[in-house]
Amino acid sequence: MKRKLLLAVALLFSGLTYAQDIPAKDVPLEVRNSFQKAFPNATKVEWELKGDLYNADFDIGRRDHEVWFTNKGAIVKHKKEISAKELPVAVSNVIKKNYTGYRIDDVDQFQEGKVILYKVELKKVGDEKKIVFDAKGGIVNRIL
């Protein structure tokens, strides 16, 4: 029993150390320059080192964003909060047709290269679903 508890605690702490907060001055200049060029209006910028990628968590206006960079300043992935009205029509139609009674609670748009995916949180009394769609309304079996 003690071994299982110790193992669980060790796994918890190893997971917590995966992402490490870092000051902006410790982010490579190429990464900071790329970030500033891509997101000149960013505010409340916080940096983390996640594995070998630099992650910036920030706001533009009232919207949350996250972007991941290589150490050379190339954008790997960008996540931004969007409104339900900004979903592609195909995605909205699938939700209306297949998820009657659910309301859209939260939407995030993920872009990796040319691939754009939408993570939609749907809620109704007593139930919640998180579904990832492609731009054509197809359900993607992928965790973002």
Image (spheres, helix red, strand yellow):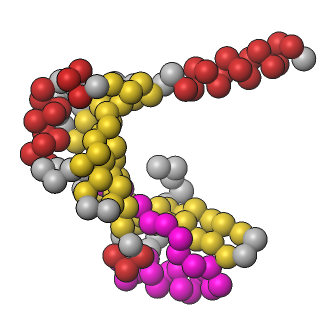
Above or below: residue 76 compared with residue 121: above
Q: Residue at x 28, y 25 (%)?
A: 23
Does 31 sit above or below residue 97?
A: above
Q: Position of residue 9 (x, y in %)?
A: 71, 20
Any part of residue 8 in sight: yes
Q: Give percent across and percent down for residue 136.
A: 38, 74
User: Could you tell me which residue is drawn at 18 percent across and 37 percent down?
Assistant: 74
Question: Which of 102/32 is in front?
Answer: 32
- Which stretch is magenta? 88-111
Q: Could you say which quadrant of the image residue 101 lies in?
A: bottom right
Residue 28 magenta? no
Task: Please indicate whether residue 51 sits to the left or right of residue 139 in the image.
Answer: left
Q: Quadrant of the N terminus?
A: top right
Q: Is residue 140 above or below residue 42?
A: below
Q: Quadrant of residue 114?
A: bottom left
Q: Nearer the viewer, residue 133 or 87?
A: 87
User: In x, y percent, where is residue 142?
Assistant: 51, 52
- Residue 71 in the image, given as x and y percentages of width and height: 22, 26
Give above or below for 138 relative to 12. below
The residue lying at 35 percent from left, 55 percent from top is: 64
Residue 77 visible within the image: no
